[in-house]
Structure formats: structure tokens, C-alpha cells
Image (cartoon, helix red, strand yellow):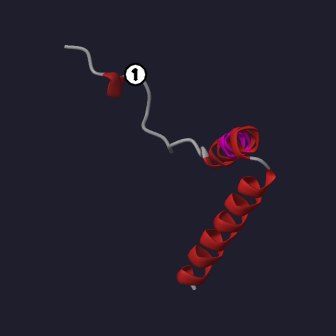
Amino acid sequence: MYHRSHDRPVGRAPNYTAACVVMFGVNLIWVLVALLAAFGLAAVLLAGLALNGWISWLAARRR
């Protein structure tokens, strides 16, 4: 029987934090561009304001 665990020693998991932050930025940009195309600048500004409020709320909750 073949076991993958015998191929190499168990190490640490890779850190994907930077990739997660980059993909969050990419997704945020395309969503904002889609909002801009569909509803105009006011919708983008309101979405940005709502996102800022949500992030501030999360930061205050962590303290």
C-alpha cells in the first residue's frame, strides 16, 4: 500500500496571507468596476463607505 506521508517529512504549511490579500484586492476592484458600470459613481462611493464602516467595526470588535 502506498502512503503519501512516506514521501517527505511533515513540514509547516505555506503562508498564503499575501496571496489572500492580493486576491481580495483583485475581487474588490472588479466588483467596484461592475458597480460603476451598472449604477454609477454614487453606488461605488456608497459601497466604499459601507466597506469602510464594516472594517472599522471589525477592528473595534477585535480590541
Callout 1 secondary element:
loop
**Image spot of residue 41 (x, y percent):** 80, 52
Residue range corresponding to the magenta coloring: 26-32
Q: Is residue 53 above or below residue 29?
A: below
Identify which residue, 19 or 47, lies in the foreground.
Answer: 47
- Magenta stretch encompasses residue 28: yes
**Image spot of residue 51 (x, y percent):** 65, 64
Of all residues, the one furthest to the front in this rendering is 39
**Image spot of residue 6 (x, y percent):** 34, 24
Q: Is residue 27 left or right of residue 6?
A: right
Label 1, on which residue? 7
Q: Residue at x 57, y 74 (%)?
A: 58
State which quadrant residue 45 falls in.
bottom right
Of all residues, the one furthest to the left in this rendering is 1
Of all residues, the one furthest to the right in this rendering is 41
Q: Is residue 61 left or right of residue 44?
A: left
Q: Is residue 20 left or right of residue 42?
A: left
Q: Is residue 5 left or right of residue 38?
A: left
Q: Residue at x 71, y 40 (%)?
A: 26
The crowd level at tag 1 (other Cα within 10 Å; few <14, some 14-19, many 20+) is: few
Q: Residue at x 43, y 33 (%)?
A: 9
State which quadrant residue 57 falls in.
bottom right
State which quadrant residue 30 falls in.
top right
**Image spot of residue 13 (x, y percent):** 50, 43
Q: Is residue 56 above or below residue 34?
A: below
**Circle 1: residue type:** Asp
Q: Main secondary structure of the magenta part?
A: helix
Identify which residue, 51 or 7, lies in the foreground.
Answer: 51
Q: Is residue 26 above or below residue 5?
A: below
Quadrant location of the C terminus? bottom right
Q: Residue at x 42, y 38 (%)?
A: 10
